Structures are given as C-alpha cells and as structure tokens.
Amino acid sequence: MSACPSRRRLLAAGTTLALLPGGAAAQATSGAGRSPLTLAVTDSPHALPVLLADKMGFFAAEGLPLRVLHFPVGRIGLERLLAGEVQFATVADAPIMFASLKRNDFSIIATVTRSIGDNSMVVRNDRGIQKPGDLRGKRIGTPRASGGHFFVDTYLLYYGLTTADITLVLMEPTRVVDALVRGEVDAAGLFGTFASDALRQLGPNGRIAPGPGFFAVNFNLVSASASAGVSDADAARLLRAVERANEFIRRNPAEARQVAAGILKIDVKEVERTWDAFEYRLHLSQPLVSQLEAQVRWALREKLVPPGTRAPEYLDMVRVEPLRQVDPRAVRLVR
C-alpha cells in the first residue's frame, strides 16, 4: 500500500531538509550505540519546532539518541532537569528566572520561540467584566511562578490596577482552567492551549478581554551542564534538528499547523487563531537577558523572593557555543 499524501509530504520534507548543514547521513552514525539523552518538552505551541523535530525524526537524523518526555508546562520540565532526570528542557523565561535565583548549574542554549499576544486574560461573561477596570475586586487565577503570573501583573499595571486591587489566586497550571470553568475564579491569566481549553469549555460564557499588545514571552531550550554529560556537540545536534523543523514551518506553514493540531490534540482553528503571535526562530539575543532582569525586579516588588535577592549575571548562564556551531549570526549578545 502506498503512503498517504500527508506522509509522502513529510518524507519529502525530511529528504529536502537533510541537505541543511550537518546532513543526516554523516550525523546519524555518530549516535550509534550511545545511551539516549532525555528531553522534557512542553505540549504547547511555544515548543512547536521541538515537537515537530521529534515527530519528524530530525533528532535521530542528526545522530542524537534522544528520549522525549511530555509535560503540560515548562516549569515541570525544568524541575526535572534540575533534579538530574533529564538533560534538556523547553521552558519560558519566568521559570528560568525563579530557578536562577537559587542555582546556576544549568544553561540557556537558545530561544526557540518569541511570542507577542499569546498570553490572554480569559474572563467569565457572568461576572460583569466588560472592561479591564471591572477586574477590581475580582478573583484572578494564574499558574504560580510562571509567565502567566508575570502577565497578570503587567496587565493590571497597564490598566491602572495592582495586585492589591484584586484577589490573586496562584495554583498549579493544570488546575487554573478547571477553577475558571467551575467559577472559583472570575478570570484567569492563561497562555497556549490552556486559554484555548478554557474558551472551549466555557463556550458562550467565556471570552478574551482586551489586553496590551506588547507583552512578550521568550521560550527557550535549556541544558544541563557539560559536567552532567551534555556536550556542546550534543547540544548543537539538538539545535540542528530544531532548525530543520523551523525550515519545515517556513516552507509549509499550512501543513505545519495541521501537524501541530495533531500533536497538541486541538482543532486546527485553535492553532490558526494564535499562529501569528509566534516567531519560530533559533537565537540568543539581548531581549532575553533584559526580560530576565526585569522579572527579577518584578519578583522583588511583589515579594515573591526574599528582600535583597540579587539577579545573577545572566550572560554567564547563556551557553553560546552550540548555537554558534549551527548559525553564528543567531548569537547577538552584548558582553
């Protein structure tokens, strides 16, 4: 039986992308007989290039034996990495900031995705919230120690409110949508598939409130240290595989959305709704460092960390050599 059209297109794309730098044939043999490293990936549009690289076999094609574990949010994957259970993880900037205030034995090897506009304030229509000012006195839920938490604070400040004007309910990410649907909170700061899931379950009783269009999230790949068994060569193989997926997204955006919907188990219309909010591009640049520093100031202001906590030197936590091996132009940091 011949392969289906979609499968044929994926195979053709793999053949084309094998011609990228670091071709598959030469790389594949280098991983023979090795114990696999482990990657914790977030099931979110933010991690789409990484999810695609796994789905389409690009890690194996680059000679990187890799076991992939899936988690609902990046913070859990980062915790697994810090516990020594995985060697790579996808995670947004806020969890990196909180972890970096306690330890520095991990590195950022690339920003995978930069998103603007994906974070949303999802409100219940039966709570009288017609405009942002109506959030005063309301209960707002959001995942603790997350980009969603930072978003809620930024959202409130933008509209002349503070966390003192609302009741902020911090909970585990997997509980926020359920709390909103049950009516335990009046609104929620959500992102990725959590927002889509909340809107689907709320139906006509849910909507996205207007929000600032400038809020950005850097979604990153982090690695354990070289002393923990992650070499620059392995990290570069990982990044080459992700770059193959980026090339597939650029050349076949419609098919990439279809594949993403299948991986994330959501309707393709939900992928299309926020597609333009994401920039899929491997890079290491100054906005990441600036964002992490800003988040430390926020955490201090909101008393989320002990007084006097000092930000680490984030440039020292960026591991640039693997990305330089893949694309030297993608590293733009001021030292």
Image: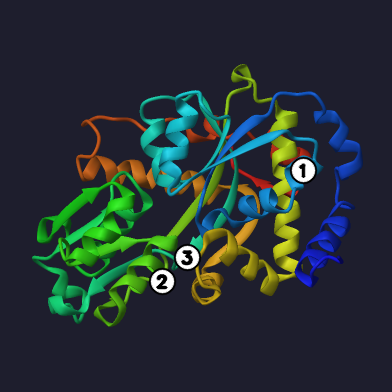
Q: Nearer the viewer, residue 334 or 327?
A: 327
Above or below 230: residue 271: below
Q: Which mark is residue 213?
A: 2
Report the Cα–Cα distance between label 3 and label 2.
7 Å
Mark before the other along the chain sequence, 3 or 1: 3
Residue 271 is situated, as x and y percent measured from the top left of the image, at: 53, 70
Q: Considering the numbered disc 1 on the image, is that residue within a helix, a strand or a loop? A: helix
Q: Can residue 295 be seen from the camera position used here?
A: yes
Are circles 3 and 2 on residues that touch, CB within 8 Å? Answer: yes
Are circles 2 and 1 on residues that touch, CB within 8 Å? Answer: no
**Mark 1: few/some/many CA within 10 Å (<14, 14-19, 20+):** some
Q: Which mark is residue 326?
A: 1
Residue under numbered circle 3: 116
Q: Residue at x 52, y 63 (%)?
A: 265
Q: Can residue 209 be seen from the camera position used here?
A: no
How does the figure colour the protein chain or chains?
rainbow
Mark before the other along the chain sequence, 3 or 2: 3
**Mark 2: few/some/many CA within 10 Å (<14, 14-19, 20+):** few
Q: Considering the numbered disc 2 on the image, is that residue within a helix, a strand or a loop? A: loop
